[in-house]
Amino acid sequence: MELLAKTLLLCSTLALVTGAPAHQQESAADGDGAVPDRCKGIEFDAITPDEKGVTLFFKGDHLWKGFHGSIQLANESFKELDDNHHIGHVDASFRMHNTEKTGDHDHIYLFLDDKVFRYYNENLEDGYPKEIQEDFPGVPSHLDAAVECPKGECIADSVLFFKGQDIHVYDVATKTVKTKTWSHLPVCTSALRWLEHYYCFHGHNFTRFNPVTGEVSGGYPKDARSYFMKCAGFGHGGNYSTPKCSEIKLDAITSDDPGKTYLFSGPIYMRLDTKRDGLHAFPITRTWKEVSNGVDAVFSFTNKIYMIKDDKVYIYKSAAHYTLIEGYPKTLKDELSIEGHVDSAFVCPSENMVYIIQGNTMREVDLTATPRVVTQDLPLPLSDIDAGLCGPEGIHLFKGGLYYHYESPMTLALSRIAPFPQNITSAMLGCQD
């Protein structure tokens, strides 16, 4: 039930994404009473997620915890950042990604001049601070920004160090550096990896870039106050609010081969496997730009994600950034030998069969067959299913504010009476009872 709990919990965050509420006055103050206000368009010194996934924004001797957190003195969390140690600000910061060395993985690195400080749970680790070159040979001092880049998004587990328009790409395993010049990218004063995308912050704006090529695509720069903090008069997207538990309405849910889990509702989607680094809703067109009117059903198979809307099937490669396969969309009939509205679809782990629910009928389609044809039509003891997901703990079928659990497709197919439905509650979802 762990996956179900994570899945249901996500819906409660819809209100966090858009239409920012009124900004609350920040209360912390330093010695001379000057308090930076990130809603006035400041330039951050450094940004990084911590080991718990909370994003830290540094400015002078202050910091903010999270997109919606209030300001505080940095030395309340990192006691070495004080006047006694003559550390008034941070030049750059990042969270290490190195699953091969668990003693380094998820540790936080803060840089100042020619020194590096390493923290875990806000405690400075033994032997630090060190000279930057001691930990990161070939990396210059007086950095502007830094950001981690895991293998798969970069060629190898890496750290990108920014100084001016030079980017020093540090290979974590080999401890070697390759330097690139990205003159087309603004000079970054801080950088952040968030939900597998990379952001260069400059002034009060940000620009999203490709971590391998530095390529920028889309309408950038954008104002950080509309996306990475809560400020009056700023925001993006629609005006979502926390729904009542009895009014929950999912359209689709799926997990792909790399382990990314997505929930779809109306025009938005949410990543369900990134809870540590924040749960956020986005327009479906942000990732799947060709699917502009929501989805009816979604399933994943062999590193591809299938999206069904009306009588069309869109198939995307499940790479770091989804790309529509040439020749798609195709009709449901041509792709899956199915006609009519699809309520839900799911594929179980290590299986080649997609189970498509239409009304009170579940149809099996062998995805390895050519052409693909329906192999069985099976009656169901319930109908009007909103979404379905098959995982290690079995099948979950969602219908409004209820869900039904089955151990396997076989138990679902053999069932003649629907199991007792379980209510989605505020404890599970954060919705309103």
Image (tube, helix red, strand yellow):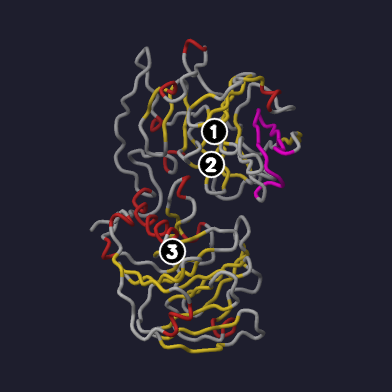
> Badge 1 local density, few (<14 within 10 Å), some, or many (20+)?
many
Mark 2 vs mark 1: in front: 1
Above-or-below relation of 70 to 8: above
Assign a secondary structure to mark 1. strand
Q: Is residue 357 left or right of residue 197?
A: left
Quadrant location of the N terminus in the rendered image: bottom left
Name the residue beneath numbered marker 1: 202
Identified by mark 1, the residue type is His
Mark 2 and mark 3: span between their CA atoms? 28 Å
Residue 341: where, in percent of width, then height? 44, 82
Residue 14: where, in percent of width, then height? 36, 54
Q: Is residue 357 left or right of residue 402?
A: right
Assign a secondary structure to mark 3. strand
Residue 223 appears in the picture as rendered:
no
Foreground of the two, 433 or 128: 128
Quadrant location of the C terminus in the rendered image: bottom left
Name the residue beneath numbered marker 3: 264
Mark 3 vs mark 1: in front: 3
**What residue lies at 52% left-to-right and 70% top-to-bottom?**
299
Q: Residue 282, labelled with which disc?
A: none
Name the residue beneath numbered marker 2: 221
Q: Which residues are magenta?
A: 153-173
Instruction: Work out whether mark 2 precedes mark 1 in sequence or the reverse, and give the earlier one.
Output: 1
